[in-house]
Image (tube, grey):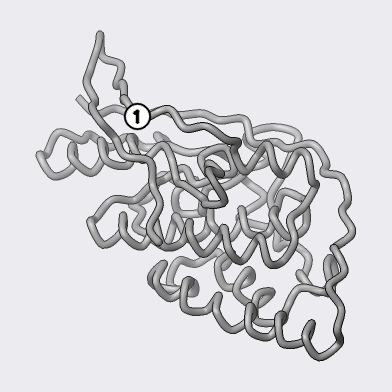
Amino acid sequence: MTEYLPLYDSGDTGGALWFTMPLMTGETLRSRLEQSGRLSVADTMHLIGEVADALDYAHRHEVVHRDIKPENILLHEGHAIVADFGIGKALAAASEHGTMHTQVGVTVGTPAYMSPEQAAGETVDGRSDLFALGCVLFEMLTGEVAFSGPTVQATIARRFVHTPPPMQTLRPDVPLALAQLVDRLLEKEADDRMRTSAQVVQSLRAPVVERRSSRRRSGEETPLKRRGRGTNPCTEFRFYHAS
């Protein structure tokens, strides 16, 4: 099921872009993480699969979100809905009409979730969103931010020099295939990640079967222990020029 928040209208007022979207009830993934610390494997698989499906639809229509993070994933009636596609659509439209002027060091996104190429101000495609998806997936499973630092600059720099600890050492109950997916999405080079969000959706199916089968064999259905989260250094900033 593809779930994303539609964009009703957009405009430019005094040089500032604005977007109109429907009001959704429920909570954000950020709120859920703040309450729970981390999510169960089953809930994570369900929600991240829907986010990946929404991204696949967007990417096939040549729209890169550029700001995938827990704050932009809404939880509504048991489903994950991706919000804030407005910037991606505006930049895509501006580029199509030749009105997008790129500048060195100018970028759009949130430091804790930006891909290395996005943080460097380079041209990005759907694989940049997949890196952010990997950051969100890591956080959902561990309750920790994959890349953090005391300042915005330090947070951005971490993705170039730091590799998060292996998932199996942080949470041994995570299926191996899912842990490998996290590693693949967090590759620093875009060419080393999966090529499409559709591949992410497909790869999510095997760990689900593996996890459910092992539970049936053991007869266990024990809820996962939860732990608190540390400080989240995801101060948001957006600098763009689309005139």
188 left or right of 162?
A: left
Residue at figure coordinates x 28%, y 37% from the top left: 102
**Disc 1 marks which residue?**
21
Residue at figure coordinates x 60%, y 36% from the top left: 27
Residue 116 against residue 76 in the figure, above or below: below
Q: Residue furthest bottom?
A: 217
Residue at figure coordinates x 55%, y 75% from the top left: 204
Q: Dot 1: few (<14), some (14–19), or many (≥20) neighbours within 10 Å? A: some
| Image-quadrant location for residue 105 | top left
Residue at figure coordinates x 62%, y 43% from the top left: 29
The image position of residue 225, as x and y in percent, is 89, 59
The image position of residue 84, as x and y in percent, is 41, 36
The image position of residue 169, as x and y in percent, is 85, 71
Helix, strand or loop at disc 1? loop
**242 vs 47, nearest the viewer:** 47
Q: Amino acid at mark 1?
A: Met
182 left or right of 242?
A: right
**172 vs 154, nearest the viewer:** 172
The image position of residue 96, as x and y in percent, is 13, 44
Residue 102 against residue 177 in the figure, above or below: above
Number of numbered discs overlaid on the protein picture? 1
160 left or right of 189?
A: right
Q: Residue furthest top?
A: 14
32 left or right of 110?
A: right
| Image-quadrant location for residue 10 | top left
